[in-house]
Amino acid sequence: MSLRFACLMILTLPFVAQAGETAALPAAGGLRMWAGLAVVMALILLLYAAAQRWLRWPTGGRSGVIRIRETRPLGPKKYLYLVQVRDRELLLGVTAERICLLNDAPLPDGDEPVDGAENQIFSQMLRKRLKERP
């Protein structure tokens, strides 16, 4: 029985010693936690920077040929998209099941619309399409 008790005491000795250390310096545990958090955050930021530099992400945004000019929600999982592809503007109806081309028109004046004109063009195309519906 004394052998079991001695083994139990030896196995629990590191935990008792550690509890005594943290009780003596309560700020050391918090400092260690913040230091660990800082190391983890730095590692995440380094991995993000490396991924941005060396991994190829799909091109998007304003540098590609296809641009989504405007989006209008119509209901749950139903949207209208005004998409510019080179010198054409496409009005697309998008649902969860399919995508429909509602209107296809050239860009006005062969130029890219300015920010204020985008809403007018979208509204004009939408009104025109709604008038054409039976």
Image: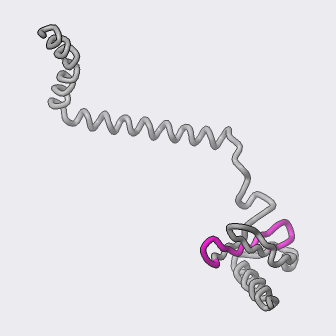
Q: Residue at x 18, y 27 (%)?
A: 19
Q: Is residue 63 above or below residue 11?
A: below
Foreground residue among 119 and 3: 3
Can you give x and y, in whole percent of width and height, for residue 82 in the image? Answer: 74, 73
Q: Residue at x 79, y 91 (%)?
A: 131
Q: Residue at x 79, y 85 (%)?
A: 129
Q: Quadrant of residue 39?
A: top left
Q: Is residue 13 above or below residue 117?
A: above
Foreground residue among 91 and 40: 91
Magenta residue span:
74-90
Name, please, the residue furthest toward the top: 3
Q: Where's the C terminus, which quadrant?
A: bottom right
Can you give x and y, in whole percent of width and height, for residue 132 in the image? Answer: 82, 89
Relative side of 86 to 18, left or right: right
Q: Is residue 9 above or below residue 96?
A: above
Relative side of 43 to 99, left or right: left
